[in-house]
Amino acid sequence: MRRQLAEAVSRLTPDQFFSVLFFGGNGRILELGGGELLRAVPAAKQDAIQLAESVRPEGQTDALSALVRAMSLRTSDGRGPDLIYFLTDGFDLDKEGTAGLAEQAEELRRKLAPQAVIHTFAFWASPMDRQVLEMIAQRSGGSFTCVDYEPENRIEDLK
């Protein structure tokens, strides 16, 4: 995923704006740009790639906080994101909490970034979590992708 992120960021042109953020336990969010969408100039793209290389999976998943943060990002002239790629291994919620997550995400999208299309990616996620990610993507006009690896390859794939 790091390699694919680096390739995607490298392809951005200077007339585009972007940000990269990672979320982990206790609502912790690591991000590029401090709340702003950045112009895709070489220095910003290099900073994004370095941030991605430094992050390691850890902690619980606070997906809703991450989505709110992504939808709240703005350019210096106030434009919000048009496209969000949301990748997770699932949600740390009970069954009832997970069931309402897609609805909450869509309400927030309509309020914060109605133009945003959300593409979702599931990694080793449970069937219920996959269903939520599929609904989030579908409601915004995005696509859902599920990526699974054989259990014996998981540790090696994270290196």
Image (tube, rainbow, N blue to C red):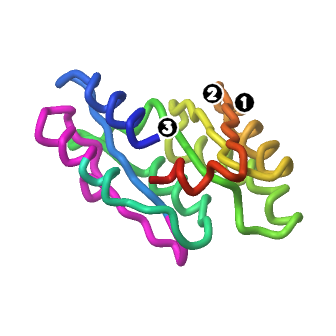
Distance from the alpha carbon under mark 3 to that under mark 2:
9 Å
Q: Is residue 27 magenta?
A: yes
Residue at left 55%, top 43%?
86
- In the picture, the disc for residue 84 is 3
The three-letter amino acid code for the residue at tag 1 is Gln
Q: Callout 3, which amino acid?
A: Ile
Residue 4 locus on image (x, y percent) = 42, 33
Q: Distance from label 3 to label 1 (Cα)?
A: 13 Å
Mark 2: amino acid: Gly
* In contact (CB < 8 Å): disc 3 and disc 1: no
Dots 3, 2 in contact, CB < 8 A: yes
Residue behind mark 1: 138
Compared with residue 25, is residue 120 higher up or lower down, i.e. above or below? above
* Residue position for label 2: 142
Residues shaded magenta: 24-49
Which residue ends up furthest to the bottom in the rendered image? Answer: 26
Circle 3 sits in a helix, a strand or a loop, which is it? strand
User: What residue sits 23% from the left and 39% below the top?
Assistant: 77
